[in-house]
Amino acid sequence: MLRRMMLALVLALAIPATAQAHFQMLYTPEIALNEGGEMVLKIVFTHPFDAGHTMDMGPVQEFYVLQQRGSEGEPKKVDLKQYLKEIKWKGHSNAAVAYEAVLPKTVVRSMGDYVFVLVPSPYLEKEEDAYIQQITKLVVNVGGVPGNWSAPVGLPAEIIPFDKPYANWAGGVFRGQVLSEGKPVEHAELEVEYLNHEPDMKANTFKEQAAVTAPHDSMMTMGVLANAQGEFTIGLAKAGWWGVCALGAGPEKEYQGKELSQDAVIWVKAFEMK
Amino acid sequence: MRVLLSMLFCVALLCSASLAFAHTPLCSCFDNGDGTVMCEGGFSDGSSASGVKMVVKDASGAVLEEGTMSEVSEFTFKKPAGDFTVHFEAGEGHAIIIKGSDIK
């Protein structure tokens, strides 16, 4: 009886930990812009559904944007590392090292797509004694002229959107494909999480009020499998932000003698149809 | 035969209509801060606005400057002193007028 009770306790403690998913956020409030201008981005490694434990980020390896107006021509690459500034971001249980980037209006000015790419340094998850590196994309559009939103950047781990990540109605779907060094990842394992607490851009924290309540832990972080071509479809049940992460999609499996999960993350925004 | 022809005509009509509506003309201008204004154009399907006629008019409608969108769908002109409008003229149903006062 005692053993059974202990087992129940262990399970109860274990479940919340497994239900949470790490997500690299690359966030700016609006990604479907009518015109360009100064842009503020927050770069936070956290658990977006419950705004819970937030992780200290290490140095950023790469941060840049690829801009393209129209379907012809080559994307223009602008390095953005010079705009990074270390900040403290407060999750609901702790504060951690994160980054902010204030981009002058010259960066996001022209019409077209802006594919932001963040390559963080691997994060040591002590509980698992393994590293996590989430290579993250955020696609912004100015003025409605599309460009390179669906073009592969050529990252080691990458999600290619089949739907514009900035142009979705709530209730619609978002489709994509998981690539590892440009090749589809067969039956890729994905995690999907809703950004349940709106980020407070001024206070560098999440708002207290949650948008939804999950009836079950499996709906905080939703597990999705891609098909044999690495393609997947998710529903966008509610307006707001949806994070999609392909676990271990990248080719690097080891970092500093420990296991590495090189993940690909993309953020999608859905708008209320009203 | 006649039915078939008229059906074909209808299909053609529907197709041309959907083609016309499938892409929206888009144009945006900004003040370069050096006495010039730059306008960019394009279409919602990603196609280029290269060659589209651009006209700058004063408040009375008199033409101040005329030109076309460049190979990279851009058009730069000297910022007029008074009120003005910029006209992106990509054909019927595909015209855009931007007020000078809205250009930042």
Image: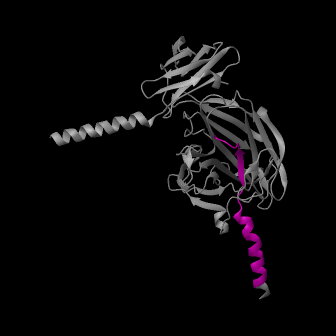
- Return the x and y of residue B74 as percentages of the image width and height: 56, 20
Residue farthest toward the left in the current orientation of the protein: B1
Q: Is residue A16 above or below residue A53?
A: below
Report if residue A66 is visible in the image. Answer: yes
Q: Nearer the viewer, residue A26 or B44?
A: B44
- Return the x and y of residue A273 as percentages of the image width and height: 55, 50
- Return the x and y of residue B47 as percentages of the image width and height: 48, 29
Is residue A19 magenta-colored? yes
Color style of the picture: one colour
Q: Is residue B48 above or below residue A122?
A: above
Q: Is residue A94 left or right of residue A252?
A: right
Q: Is residue A112 above or below residue A43?
A: above
- Return the x and y of residue A176 as percentages of the image width and height: 54, 49
Q: Nearer the viewer, residue A243 or A272?
A: A272
Q: Nearer the viewer, residue A130 or A53?
A: A53
Residue farthest toward the bottom in the current orientation of the protein: A1
Q: Residue at x 67, y 48 (%)?
A: A252
Q: Quadrant of the N terminus of chain A?
A: bottom right
Magenta stretch, residue numbers: A4-31
Is residue A172 magenta-colored? no
Report if residue A121 is visible in the image. Answer: no
Q: Is residue A102 left or right of residue A180?
A: right
